[in-house]
Image (cartoon, helix red, strand yellow):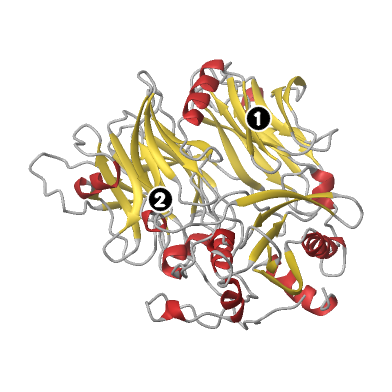
């Protein structure tokens, strides 16, 4: 494919696209507008894009030609939107309510422009919206490495987060007091941080908390053997730590049963055939449990090419559980299963076009409340009518009817929520929802610096591949009428996918006069096992690359793209696809 400029080294456009480990599944992850693309390897853009006033008067040929269009035809602001606004740190992100609902934690830039943790006392809040930030308190002061993963512990006083040391990728789990120890404490003082997983070469992962055991954390570390992660029980108030479950050498992940807060499931990857096995033990009580119940047994097996895993235990002492599985079907279904025999007790949901996504369970009864799936946009299936009513009410209050609604956090009693309204043509806005009164209070927007500018909406489109296979893609236009230069933005992985939402790179291109097309080519995840494995051995000269060619031809045929003005751009596998396009299909 044609390229306007080939850069010899990767462009790191934004710290936000850096992949970071997530806290364990016991922690809620707020919706995010981040994409699966890593730092791009091949790019086309104007040669300069200074964000000073002088720089705004300089542009490349594509922007100059498109700037002559009527302003009604442009999908973004007429002026160049500065790159530091598009790719800089968000001013507010990852808002989390304390379990008691009295405090809010969130991430924001420190005075040194490094993402750190801030706390807001909701019981003393006298202003709403962004103006309330002046009363908030910064409780960490990481000087170099941005904090990306944060969670409250169930005492509603302690925050935990993960970070590494100068980029060594040995992420540790740290704890910090969120509240002043007394009213006389200096509110501006940064409290001391405690490393709960110390050690020079130690890495932490698989982190679980449980409201029934508020003084404990289960965390996996490789301190005993750098190649495997054992599970430790940490009493974070005292710093006491003891070995809970030994890794036999082949376990890559663990699950806990909530009522007992015991490690009861293990995910095993077979290095010889790439199959996955779920091991279960019916008890971890070595004193009162029987020898048979304490024994690990292989219960579920997924050969290479199949997808699935254990999500959670049911509230029956862990005799049954929720499992996703593609066995005997194209996409993963949500199943209720017997954890001793492996028998499927009930199929709860499946979708012919895509895998099951997120699942919401009642924290006490473990009854299924809702689930999501995402073929092109996030869709929800409700099993709890009250939860569905809340969702419909919140949807009716959205200022943008095209926004997607997500719950970023809830208090333990679920009386108070933080709700995110995500859109493709602007920043995410957060509100606090008081469920008993249905009162909605503005919290903040993720990046208020974006608000003065106009952005292009992202469209989800369907593209027929050369062999008739339907591909989901996302189109961000630079003009509302007629063709424009096109950038084919290829996601990395390739075992990943693109999603609908605000994409800084696509907005950057649209503002400079380029349409952007992002294609979930065969080999992308989320669309079932056959779609995924249609990409096997199809890199470069095969069907994965042909899908990209088909996408360009579709865009030209639909009058979206100029046939002689097309670029390919991407990072990770997307960078490989760029080189393959330049080598094998230079005339596209």
Q: Is residue 519 above or below residue 143?
A: above
Q: CA distance from mark 2 to mark 1?
A: 48 Å
Q: Is residue 74 left or right of residue 489?
A: left
Residue that appears at 46% across and 38% down:
399
Residue at image x 17%, y 42%?
180
Residue lying at the far left in this picture: please name it.
Answer: 184
Give the residue pinned by disc 2.
446
**Count of numbered tags:** 2
Where is mark 1, residue-wise? Answer: 295
**176 left or right of 496 in image:** left
Q: Position of residue 352 (x, y in %)?
A: 80, 34
Q: Nearer the viewer, residue 246 or 90?
A: 90
Q: Position of residue 415 (x, y in %)?
A: 37, 22
Q: Position of residue 385 (x, y in %)?
A: 56, 16
Under circle 1, the secondary element is: loop
Residue 164 against residue 434 in the figure, above or below:
below
Image check: 110 left or right of 348?
left
**Residue positioned 86% across, 33% down in the render:** 328
């Amino acid at each position: 494919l044609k390229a306007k400029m080939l850069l010899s080294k990767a462009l790191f456009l934004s710290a936000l696209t850096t992949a970071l480990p997530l806290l364990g599944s016991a922690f809620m992850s707020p919706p995010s507008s981040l994409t699966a693309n890593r730092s791009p390897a091949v790019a086309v853009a104007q040669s300069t894009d200074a964000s000073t006033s002088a720089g705004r008067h300089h542009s490349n040929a594509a922007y100059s030609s498109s700037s002559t269009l009527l302003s009604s035809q442009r999908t973004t602001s007429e002026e160049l939107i500065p790159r530091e606004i598009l790719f800089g740190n968000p001013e507010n992100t990852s808002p989390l309510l304390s379990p008691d609902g009295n405090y809010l934690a969130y991430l924001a830039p420190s005075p040194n422009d490094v993402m750190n943790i801030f706390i807001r006392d909701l019981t003393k809040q006298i202003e709403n919206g962004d103006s309330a930030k002046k009363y908030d308190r910064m409780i960490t002061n990481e000087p170099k490495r941005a904090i990306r993963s944060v969670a409250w512990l169930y005492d509603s006083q302690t925050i935990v987060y993960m970070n590494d040391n100068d980029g060594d990728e040995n992420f540790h789990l740290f704890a910090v007091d969120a509240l002043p120890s007394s009213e006389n404490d200096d509110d501006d003082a940064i409290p001391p941080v405690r490393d709960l997983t110390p050690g020079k070469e130690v890495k932490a992962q698989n982190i679980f908390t449980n409201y029934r055991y508020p003084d404990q954390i289960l965390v996996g570390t490789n301190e005993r053997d750098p190649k495997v992660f054992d599970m430790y029980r940490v009493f974070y108030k005292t710093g006491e730590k003891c070995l809970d479950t030994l890794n036999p050498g082949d376990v890559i992940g663990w699950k806990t049963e909530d009522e007992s807060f015991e490690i009861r499931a293990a995910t095993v990857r077979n290095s010889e055939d790439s199959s996955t096995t779920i091991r279960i033990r019916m008890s971890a009580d070595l004193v009162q449990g029987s020898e048979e119940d304490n024994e690990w047994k292989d219960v579920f097996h997924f050969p290479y090419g199949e997808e699935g895993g254990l999500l959670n235990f049911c509230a029956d002492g862990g005799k049954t559980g929720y499992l996703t599985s593609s066995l005997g079907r194209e996409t993963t279904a949500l199943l209720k299963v017997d954890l001793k025999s492996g028998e499927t007790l009930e199929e709860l949901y499946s979708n012919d076009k895509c895998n099951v996504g997120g699942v919401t369970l009642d924290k006490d009864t473990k009854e299924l409340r809702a689930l999501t799936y995402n073929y092109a946009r996030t869709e929800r299936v409700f099993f709890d009518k009250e939860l569905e009513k809340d969702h419909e009410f919140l949807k009716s209050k959205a200022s943008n009817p095209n926004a997607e609604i997500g719950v970023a956090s809830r208090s333990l009693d679920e009386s108070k929520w933080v709700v995110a309204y995500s859109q493709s043509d602007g920043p995410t806005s957060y509100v606090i929802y008081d469920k008993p009164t249905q009162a909605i209070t503005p919290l903040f927007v993720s990046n208020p610096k974006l608000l003065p500018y106009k952005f292009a909406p992202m469209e989800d489109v369907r593209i027929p591949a050369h062999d008739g296979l339907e591909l989901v893609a996302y189109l961000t236009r630079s003009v509302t009428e007629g063709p424009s230069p096109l950038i084919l933005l290829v996601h990395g992985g390739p075992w990943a996918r693109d999603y609908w939402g605000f994409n800084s790179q696509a907005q950057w291109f649209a503002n400079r006069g380029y349409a952007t097309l992002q294609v979930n080519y065969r080999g992308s995840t989320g669309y079932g096992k056959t779609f995924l494995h249609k990409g096997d051995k199809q890199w470069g000269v095969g069907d994965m690359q042909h899908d990209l060619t088909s996408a360009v031809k579709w865009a030209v045929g639909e009058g979206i793209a100029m046939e002689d003005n097309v670029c390919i751009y991407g990072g990770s596998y997307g960078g490989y696809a760029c080189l393959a396009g330049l080598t094998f299909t230079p005339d596209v």
